[in-house]
């Protein structure tokens, strides 16, 4: 459990430091993401981005658990 928490902490630290670079990637603005903008209302649902992140995380966890 301690090792898992340390690894998650390191991952969060790396993501935090790399956030300015990661925010320039096209994630969040992919085709299939739902974006509706009207006069006083904006709705955004990152459907494609969520599916893509889920697939990548599933593959990483699958590879990690195979060891």
Image (cartoon, helix red, strand yellow):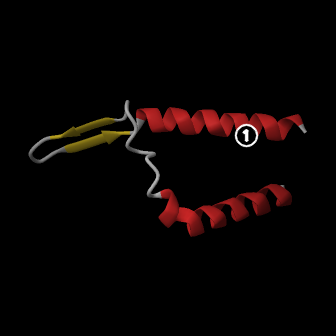
Say which quarter of the image contains residue 24: bottom left
Q: Tell me if residue 3 comes above or below residue 56 in the rendering.
A: below
Q: Nearer the viewer, residue 44 or 19?
A: 19
Residue 38 picture location, percent across and down? 13, 41
Q: Position of residue 16 (x, y in %)?
A: 57, 66
Dot 1 alpha-carbon crowd within 10 angstroms: few under 14, some 14 to 19, many 20 or more: few
Q: Quadrant of the N terminus?
A: bottom right
| Residue 8 shown left or right of residue 49 in the figure | right
Q: Please name the residue shown 41% across and 45% down the image.
A: 28
Rendered residue at 37%/35% (across/down): 33
Q: Which residue is mark 1?
A: 60
Query: Residue 60 in the image: x percent, y percent?
Result: 73, 40
Write the residue at 68% across / 34% down: 58
Which residue is at the far left?
Answer: 39
Q: Is residue 25 left or right of residue 4?
A: left
The structure residue drawn at horizontal position 75% and vertical position 39%, both measured from the top left corner, is: 61
The answer to whether residue 23 is above or below residue 32 is below
Name the residue nearer the viewer: 4 or 29: 29
Q: Quadrant of the C terminus?
A: top right
Figure label count:
1
Task: Locate residue 57: give its quadrant.
Answer: top right
Is 41 positioned to the left or the right of 7 in the image? left
**Which residue is farthest right?**
67
40 vs 9: above or below: above
Vertical relation: 22 (above or below) 40: below
Left/right of residue 16 with respect to residue 3 in the rendered view? left
- Local secondary structure at mark 1: helix
Q: Nearer the viewer, residue 9 or 26?
A: 26
Please state the horizontal and vertical placement of residue 34, each as a whole percent of the image.
32, 34
């Amino acid at each position: 459990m301690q090792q898992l928490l340390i690894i998650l902490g390191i991952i969060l630290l790396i993501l935090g430091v790399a956030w300015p670079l990661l925010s320039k990637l096209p994630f969040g603005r992919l085709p299939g993401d739902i974006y509706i903008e009207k006069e006083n209302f904006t709705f955004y649902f990152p459907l494609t981005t969520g599916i893509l992140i889920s697939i990548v995380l599933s593959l990483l966890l699958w590879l990690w658990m195979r060891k």
